[in-house]
Amino acid sequence: MGQLSMGARREITKKHAAEYGRASKKAKGVMLDQLVATTGWSRANTRRALRTALQRKGPVKAVKRVPRSRSYGYDTLKLLVQVWNLAGRPSGKYLAATMAIWLPKLERFHELDQRRLNEQTRAQLLAVSGATIDRMLKPTKDGARILGLSGTKPGPLLRNSIQVRKARG
């Protein structure tokens, strides 16, 4: 038998799911054997697909994932970039650990954008984790990365000006 597409397999499991849920243990075993032969899945995977198809009300595509709202706003991101630059661009883990030290000092000397700095952004900067700092700073770090390994242009000029002694023999 030819290879079935994933959509066809889902349709088959959806069609048999209600019957599988009502069937006796012996009948479930027979149904599983038939579906394993049809779909090419293992028994465990077929059983799992039947169970989830029974729970699903509509097609798979109809269930939309609702993204979570952002925890940290644009002002917090801009302040985080400033703190990161002024702290010497450390890793997110180190910056999160030292944020309680850096923030009061940078505030005292008015190094941060005063329009963006308020109680909410201050609390968010003190609460942000190292992994979240790394995620938030990724575009900034990627933009600041120097491309290439060397500033020297490859070419014959430098190669010809350095004398290389060759072994004789």
Image (tube, rainbow, N blue to C red):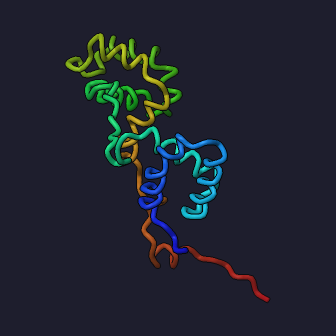
User: Where 88 falls versus 40 (above or below)?
Assistant: above
**Front residue (pair 60, 111):** 60
Residue 164 lies, in percent from the top left, at: 63, 77
Compared across the picture, whether 41 is left or right of 60 comes to right
Residue in view at x 33 percent, y 35 percent: 67
Write the residue at 54% across / 62% down. Answer: 39
Figure quadrant of the N terminus: bottom right
In the picture, measured across the screen, residue 43 lies left or right of residue 64, that is: right
Q: Give coordinates of residue 47: x percent, y percent.
A: 59, 47
Picture layout, residue 146 above or below residue 80: below
Up-down relation of residue 58 to residue 167 (above or below): above
Image-quadrant location for residue 111: top left
Which residue of the protein is positioned furthest toward the left in this rendering? 115
Residue 120 percent coordinates (x, y)? 30, 13
- Report how many numbered discs are placed on residues in the image: 0
Q: Residue at 37% x, 45% y: name it.
A: 144
In the image, farthest residue toward the right:
169
> In the rendered view of the protein, which quadrant contains the C terminus?
bottom right
Q: Nearer the viewer, residue 125 or 70?
A: 70
Q: Which quarter of the picture shows residue 153?
A: bottom left
Q: Answer above or below: position of 114 versus 17.
A: above
The quarter of the picture where residue 148 lies is: bottom left
Q: Residue at x 31, y 45 (%)?
A: 62
Foreground: 106 or 93?
93
**Relative to 51, 82 lies left or right:** left
Measuring from the top left, give residue 118's x and y in whole percent.
26, 13
